[in-house]
Amino acid sequence: MGKKKAASNGIIVTVATTGALMLLRKVLAAAWTKVTGKVPPTDLTDPKVTLPETLAWAVATGLIVETVRFAIVRTTMRRSPAVGDTESS
């Protein structure tokens, strides 16, 4: 039964992380557009995209996305018992 719970926890973490990160990317893109007045630099072949702009976008999204991913994994794992733990009644 422990293996089923571990697989279930893995699926929950994956689904929660994927959904949250998809939503987060959209929110970050909207915030970037509002702050800078430009769309986020996703097309690196565009001559209008500058190196500082690209680096700022990469650092901002990297920090925020990884922080949220960390929080989701920690929260999800904290709410479910660890693999091998048995609940005593």
Image (cartoon, rainbow, N blue to C red):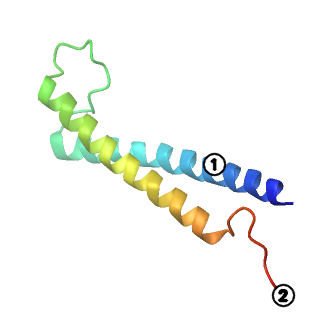
Q: Tell me which label, 2 or 1, sits earlier in the chain.
A: 1
Label 2 SS = loop
Q: Is residue 86 above or below residue 65?
A: below
- Tell me the CA gap for discs 2 and 1: 31 Å
State if disc 1 and disc 2 touch (CB < 8 Å).
no
Where is the N terminus found, in terms of image quarters? bottom right
- The reply, left or right, for residue 55 in relation to residue 21 is left
Extreme residue toward the right, this view? 1
- The reply, left or right, for residue 21 in relation to residue 76 is left
Q: Residues within 10 Å of mark 1 (few under 14, many from 20)?
A: few
Whole-percent x, y for residue 65 in the image: 39, 47
Whole-percent x, y for residue 48 in the image: 16, 18
Q: Is residue 15 above or below residue 89?
A: above
Q: Is residue 29 above or below residue 82?
A: above
Whole-percent x, y for residue 80 in the image: 67, 68
Residue pointed to by mark 1: 15
Where is the C terminus found, in terms of image quarters? bottom right
Q: Is residue 38 above or below residue 45?
A: below
Residue pointed to by mark 2: 89
Q: Quadrant of residue 60?
A: top left
Which residue appears at 42% of the width and 48% of the height?
24
- The reply, left or right, for residue 5 in relation to residue 23 is right
